[in-house]
Amino acid sequence: MPEGVVQTFIIVIAVLVIGIVIFGFTSALLIPAEAFTIAEHQAAQLASQTTISVGPLLVSNGQGSLVIEGYDPSYSGYYLVYAFLIPSYLVTSVGVITPNTQLAVNLPFQVYLPSKSLATETTISSVYDINGNELYQGSLSVYKIPSNTPVTILIQNVPNNGKGYYVVIWLIYTNGANSFRIGYAYTGLPSSTG
């Protein structure tokens, strides 16, 4: 084989290898970013259409109970839900308080479907707002609830029988890889119970 053909063959192979490496690197960076952007857009659209109805917090012997519903007649999928408590003096900042805020009170809770069966519990690792800003980083145990269906949240060990606290409910949309808080609501004791 003439020497020129061998050199040309080596150059062609080198260019192909470099091209494959560049393509792989670009794909590794762009595909997750594009998937995040698509999920963020879906979450923002869902947030604009979804309303959260939440009933009062009822507490008996340290166990709290409330009913919530994520309602969007055009959406027949699932939401994720997370509940935590905040002191009542923080209620004006409820939109920026997260479960890892120092004053947030994270208590064991369960979510029950209308059939009285326990909703499916799952774990997510990060929660973003609908603008792509990270709200929460770390492991978060949430429950999967159907849209347009009232569910009951039971919270254990509610301090002071709920007096001086509000329950904050996060409604979360996930595409499996990325999770977005699409709404929140809060509730406290009915005014007749203190």
Image (tube, rainbow, N blue to C red):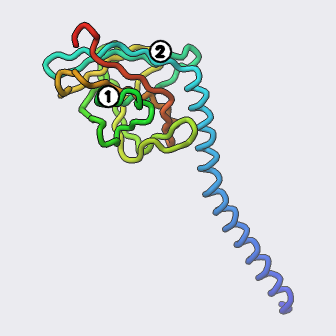
Q: Is 65 placed left or right of 48 in the picture?
A: left
The structure residue drawn at horizontal position 51% and vertical position 37%, both measured from the top left corner, is 129
The structure residue drawn at horizontal position 29% and vertical position 38%, both measured from the top left corner, is 103
- The circle drawn on residue 106 is none
| Viewer-nearest residue: 192 or 148 | 192
Provide residue 93's location: percent of width, then percent of height.
Answer: 41, 31
If the image is split into quadrants, where does the C terminus sit?
A: top left
- Nearer mark to the viewer, of 2 and 1: 1
Provide residue 50's location: percent of width, then percent of height.
Answer: 53, 20
If the image is split into quadrants, where does the N terminus sit?
A: bottom right
| Vertical placement of residue 153 versus 41, above or below | above
Q: CA distance from mark 2 to mark 1?
A: 31 Å
The structure residue drawn at horizontal position 58% and vertical position 20%, both measured from the top left corner, is 49
Which residue in the structure is indicated by mark 1? 89
Ranked by sequence position, the earlier of labels 2 and 1 is 1
Label 2: how many Cα within 10 Å (few below 14, some 14–19, many 20+): many
Which residue in the structure is indicated by mark 2? 148
| Vertical placement of residue 61 versus 103, above or below | above
